[in-house]
Image (spheres, rainbow, N blue to C red):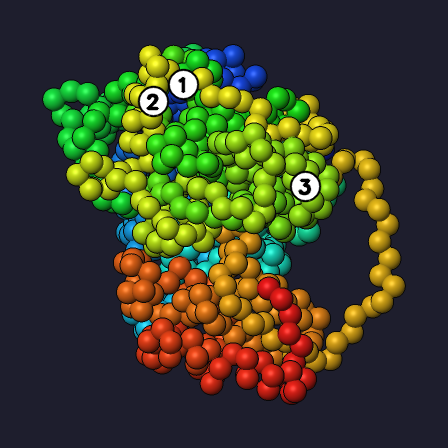
Amino acid sequence: MHSIHRPLWLLLALLLPATALAATTQLTLLHMGDLHGHLVPHPNLRSDGNGLMQGGLARLHGQIQAIRADHPHTLLINTGDTIQGSAEALFTRGEALVEALNPLAIDAFAPGNWDFVYGTERFIELFVGDAPKAPWGALAANLYYAAGDADGQRTRYVERAGERVLPPYRIVTLDGIRLGIIGMTTDRGPQAVGRNVAAGLRFTDGDRELAELLPKLREEERVDAVILISELGLANNLRLADKHPGIDLVLSSDMHELTREPITLENGTLLVEEGQDGSVLGQFDLTFVDGRLTERRWSLHTIDAQTPEEPATAARVAALRAPFVSGAAFTPHTNPINQSRLTTPIDSVVGYTKVPLLRANFSHERMPAVIEGSSHDLLTDAFRAEAHADIGAIRGFRYGTQVAPGPIHLEDLYHFMPIGAQIAVGTIRGQDLLDQIEASADSALNPSIDEWRGGSLFGYSGVEIELSPYKPRGRRAVAVRVNGEPLEPRRLYRYASYWFAADPELIKRLPARGVQVLKQADGSPLDATELVARYLQGLPEQTADPKLDRVQLTAPLPAQPFSYGIMQPLLGAAIPGVEPPTLTIDIPLELTHAKVLFNIGEPKFDGDQPSGLKFMGKLAQQLGQDGTEYRIIGIFKGDALYQMLNDRSYNRIRKTRDGNPYREQILELQRLGVEFEACGNTMRTRGFGNADLLPGVKVNRGAIGRTLQLVQEGFIQLDD
């Protein structure tokens, strides 16, 4: 009998259990996000930081390199808000951050809302195409070109309108494992600097895109895992992942929350967010057995003095900062947004503070970040004092650094205000202030996160607020006092805040009378940072000691079901574990058709949006979802008619150069079927012709007569 010689591997295969031969693969995902232009370390003054210095790009790169050395199959993912947030970012229009980050070899990038701050063309130059300046693998399933218009004409993107700007996803194969990575950018442009900044681009909330892409990746592309990288914010990403099962991991940014442990959804999705400013780096180690994801291990690395620097990055950061800091290489710079001049090194001391300056406290602590911040208290004090106003105001932004008691450097102010804002003062009504308070509170605390618009409660100087977080919109501000006296809705107040040339009659998106822009002594532009520096230098001993606790809550914010603190309640002002009141619809709504008229005579605003345009859009979307055949007509007259002007005429009438900031919103509504008309009487009295209007806007004989005609035709008139 002849012996049969078999290879050793075959003998082992016959003798060992089948499971012993299963192929095991280890992959690693590294996650960073919300860097906001921070190149060097900064203090963490929050209760989880003990005042220690954290962050710094050289240290962050050092940690990345150390992990890569031990884990050969590693991807580095960045989820946005990268090229805004510092003087170095602002004055180079993001170039400094691109040069600093390119050597990190980022594998996938989801742009954030602030990555659009330098305009559409700059965004495309940096991130889009075959050879972008930032070759980070940018992905955005929910970002499309829009037709828009310029000087009464459609934009250069008209031929591409409706196309995606960036790839919606990519497939990465590592050691035989196929990862499907879906990217989501923000659902809004950086509105704080004007709605025209992202002209030619359209954003969505991501729902339709996920419903389309998840089956494609799982069933057609046959990926082994799906990763969602998204700058839609922690709360919105939770909503998306819960609504669309099939996502293995969500790497989130925008809200600056630090999830010290992954949030686990009932459908098995894990979700994390990595704070801000490069303070931490997240690490997911993934184990695949025979191509099936079996384990997801999470590690969080704090980037601090114990983290070794990557030498080449440290040298690169020093070289990039040299033109901005004290020394022979310092060079004056021109602000690309407002044309003011930087003539002082950013490491110069411009004043001092007796209290820590930050807006980052957890929701269960004194002065929770979603409600108030000492940094905002100082800034608004400066606006009010320098403008001789009754009220100083600022949007409740999340980005910004933290400043310990002691010196304040000019670069600290640029971290707080890196968007080229100027300060103006004008007259508003008390009701306008009350509406602004209510709108910003609802944006941050509404139990329906679909109503959130980013940011937190506005910060104010000269204003004290008693706020009830659990009441509905319009009733949260229980009491408001202005300079110690109860707010009077009909009274006029001098109001100082951000001003941008795109909307010369608006101060922080509020229509104001008698707008005066604060300038340098020689009449040149004065950046908000320089105004605050001037305020500090005029204080006794150049030292600020802002009054705190300007907002008093009638009840604590909701507790969160995590072992760590968060800044903003992820369910809004809802109490976890407590069911909302039962709501039964007694009168169901079934409309086969609807004819609706909006008659708009003054430019009212709901937060940052014209209320008329907002409500037309909501109505059109709801009727469309219900399958209702509809006609919606908006008649614009009086002071509201300027919203219908094309860029050329808007610039002439509003004394600006940046065009109609509402153009894209109007074009989107037209795509939904909304019809726009301009009052012929207003057109005549103000000297307008048809050529002054946006495409598609028709002129009627007069708003009153046209309203009567439409009512006779069965239209119902609604208030905006």
Say what secondary structure mark 1 lies in.
Answer: strand
Spatial separation of the CA atoms under disc 1 and disc 3? 31 Å
x and y, in percent, of residue 245 in the image: 68, 50
- Identity, as a three-letter code, of the amino acid under mark 2: Leu
The residue that label 2 is drawn on is 536
Nearer to the camera, 685 or 440: 685
* Picture quadrant of residue 53: top left
The residue that label 3 is drawn on is 476
- Identity, as a three-letter code, of the amino acid under mark 1: Ala
**Label 1, residues with CA under 10 Å away: few <14, some 14-19, many ≥20:** many
The residue that label 1 is drawn on is 544
Nearer to the camera, 504 or 180: 504
Spatial separation of the CA atoms under disc 2 and disc 3? 34 Å
- Identity, as a three-letter code, of the amino acid under mark 3: Arg
Work out whether mark 2 precedes mark 3 in sequence or the reverse, and give the earlier one.
3
Spatial separation of the CA atoms under disc 2 and disc 1? 7 Å
- Residue visible at 36% across and 49% down? 515
- Residue visible at 85% across and 67% down? 587
x and y, in percent, of residue 79 in the image: 47, 40
Q: Is residue 16 above or below residue 512?
A: above
x and y, in percent, of residue 276 in the image: 47, 30
Q: Does 320 sit left or right of 548 as displayed?
A: left
- Image quadrant containing the N terminus: top right
Farthest residue, direction left: 328
2 and 1 marks in contact (CB < 8 Å) = yes
**Label 2, residues with CA under 10 Å away: few <14, some 14-19, many ≥20:** many
1 and 3 marks in contact (CB < 8 Å) = no
Residue 652 visible in the shown view: yes
